[in-house]
Amino acid sequence: MAWRQLLSSTVVLLFSVEKIFMQESDALNFLKKRSKRSPRSRDEVNAENRQKLRVEELRREYHEEQRNEFENFVEEQNDEQEERRREAVEQWRQWHYDGLSPSYLYNRHI
């Protein structure tokens, strides 16, 4: 009896917020436990499919966000490594500069 009161109050609440698609009696039957061998109703199948689609969408968004974060991290790492390499090459050129300008173009000994 308490379930019926709770369900009817929930239905009334939902009805006051937005239009509901089921009658109260249908809502009671929808939430009743069915036997394992009985076929599922179309409403149950649709509700389950909506739930699965939502979970798939959330999972897809999560993995896309993780992939984007990782790509940004890798790009930053590559940029830092390229900057360190550039600085090392520049230091080497300054250390080995022999007065010719620019040293790394005209002093290659091809």
Image (tube, grey):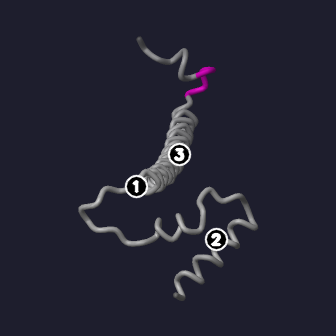
Does residue 101 belong to the magenta stretch?
yes
Residue under the point 56% across and 41% down: 83
- Res 2 quadrant in image: bottom right
At x 54%, y 15%, the residue is 106
Q: Count the marks.
A: 3
Residue contact between numbered discs 3 and 2, judged by CB atoms under 8 Å: no
Q: CA distance from mark 3 to mark 2?
A: 43 Å
For disc 3, the marked residue is 68
Q: Earlier in the sequence, mark 1 or mark 2?
A: 2
Residue at which label 2 appears: 11
Whole-percent x, y for residue 41 in the image: 40, 55
- Mark 3 or mark 2, earlier in chain: 2
* Viewer-nearest residue: 33 or 96: 33
Instruction: Please tell me how crowded label 2 is: few (under 14), some (14-19), or many (20+) other residues with Cα within 10 Å.
Output: some
Q: Position of residue 61 (x, y in %)?
A: 52, 49
Q: Compared with residue 106, is residue 37 higher up or lower down, i.e. above or below?
A: below
- Is 76 magenta? The answer is no
| Start-end of magenta stretch | 98-102
Compute the Cα span from label 3 to label 1.
41 Å
Q: Quadrant of residue 35?
A: bottom left
Three-letter amino acid code at the position of disc 2? Val
Q: Which mark is residue 41?
A: 1
Residue 2 or 110: which is nearer the viewer?
Answer: 2
Q: Nearer the viewer, residue 49 or 103?
A: 49
Marks 1 and 2, how far apart at CA: 20 Å
10 Å crowding of disc 1: few (<14), some (14-19), many (20+): few
**Secondary structure predominantly adopted by residues drawn in magenta:** loop
Instruction: Give, as a three-letter code, the residue at label 3.
Output: Asn
Name the outermost residue toward the front. Answer: 25
Helix or strand or loop: what does disc 1 sit on? loop
Q: In the image as oriented, which residue stretches furthest toward the bottom?
A: 2
Reading the chain from its start, which is encountered first: label 3 or label 1? 1
